[in-house]
Image: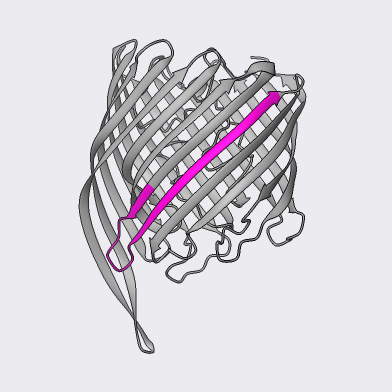
Amino acid sequence: MGSPQDTQSSGAEESRAATPGPHTYGDAEKVGLNYAGTSPPRNVLLLGFNAGSSYDDSIFGNNQHRTGDVDFLFGPNLSVHRDGRLLRLALSYQPYFRIYRRVSEPNAVDQTLGLDAAYQATSRLSFRARASAFYTTGLFQPGQNGEFVPGLGSPSSLNNTLFTPTTRELTWNSRIDASYQAGAHDSVGLFVGDSRLDFTQQVSSAGNLQNMEERQAGLLYEHRLSPHTTVGTNYLFENIRFGLDSRTLVHSAFVSYAQQLSRSLTLSVFGGPQYSRLHEVVIFPVGPFRFQVPIFQAGWSWALGATLAKRLDKTALQLTAQRQVSNGGGFIGAVVGLSVGASVRRQLLGRWDALWSGGYAKSTSVASEFSASDFQSETAGFGLERALTEKLSFRVGYDFLRQRATGQSALFASFDRDLWSAQLTYRFHQIALGR
């Protein structure tokens, strides 16, 4: 089972279509916990089946009326990886049924889809398209097959430090890149992106979840100082829409630096100013009347972030810290978010792998005093994985989430959840694809 701090392994480093070496901030690559020297299968089609069960002590994400229950989850999965001379394609699709033992209301058929395609048009010009879609209910979901499709990371993804209560939702992230290798050490890139969060049972009144859309465009420049050192600049434009009456425009200029400190250790840092301009409509009830008042607000803030990754033959470690303006995850239009996180993967005796993760985040709304909200969350997770046979693997885990909110979202955005889970994954067919 997945968790808010996703502890599933990912083949992010293998999916880069650019020149070797460390990459600076802005390419939205989602880095995972890979051991040194590992890579996903290539030119294959994999068919598998997942089955599992879990106990969630608050299936509706409501501290006032806590309801715990056991669920049963099962469904097939399909993964394709194809490397050609000019075209590289990775696809992952996983539908699954979730059935609760006592409560039938949250029973559902959930689906996840991931796509990563790259095309080398000329020796200097390349294009890449990435997308992921999740049609799910609930916070804790099985991890998408990140071995093939890592997904999109910051800055081209929805805010993963804000957690909504259990509700049916469609999450969509997409990005298209065009990259030009201007010289042996210089590259320039343009990108556009779109992220959406749609709730199927949307309530339009203030203080409830609202549909959200974020559109992005940006310009990237990278210069490789040496085979182990890269510097870059990044301009990012974001248009964040929340519900019908809130819109935030964000302009960001980042400078970034990436250094491969040793064969196993990589450091990446970035920073720069961000300018935000908010336009929202605030409703003031006066007796039987409701008055709509437009509010405009603008301000500057600083973005900073760093990632430290270490990969050995039997250990993978990742530390992250970040502060920047982001979307409000369905609670509010935009927030200034501060987050720190750590994740570790360690190979144990007897073909077991252990995974630990933990994170802390604090988000303050970019909003007028009439609609301000603050959020704070802590997450933790632990898992054990083992390959029982060449095709069959087993995982048990525990995940914890605590979130608190103040302001208009205080009631339904504050909750605690614990999840204990077990899952079997069986790859029953593998077809080799010719180059």
Q: How many marks?
A: 0
Magenta region, residue range: 362-386
Name of the residue lying farthest toward the front: 349
Q: Horizontal and vertical percent for residue 12?
A: 50, 25
Q: Is residue 58 above or below residue 76?
A: below
Dominant SS in magenta? strand
- The colour style of the image is one colour
Residue 431 is left or right of residue 10, and the answer is right
Q: Is residue 310 magenta?
A: no
Nearest to the observer: residue 265 or residue 42: 265
Nearest to the observer: residue 194 or residue 400: 400
Quadrant of the snapshot with the C terminus: top right
Q: Is residue 18 above or below residue 297?
A: above
Q: Quadrant of residue 218?
A: top left
Residue 254 is left or right of residue 1, and the answer is left
Residue that appears at 30% across and 56% down: 366
Asked if one can make out residue 151 in the rendered structure from this viewpoint, the answer is: no
Q: Horizontal and vertical percent for residue 317?
A: 47, 24
Q: Is residue 364 above or below residue 323?
A: below
Residue 128 is left or right of residue 396, and the answer is left
Nearest to the observer: residue 203 or residue 84: 203
Quadrant of the snapshot with the N terminus: top right
Name of the residue lying farthest toward the right: 428
Q: Horizontal and vertical percent for residue 242?
A: 40, 59
Q: Is residue 343 above or below residue 329?
A: above
Q: Quadrant of residue 68?
A: bottom right
Q: Horizontal and vertical percent for residue 219?
A: 30, 34
Asked if one can make out residue 78 in the rendered structure from this viewpoint, the answer is: yes
Q: Is residue 372 magenta?
A: yes
Residue 410 is left or right of residue 395, and the answer is left
Name of the residue lying farthest toward the bottom: 288
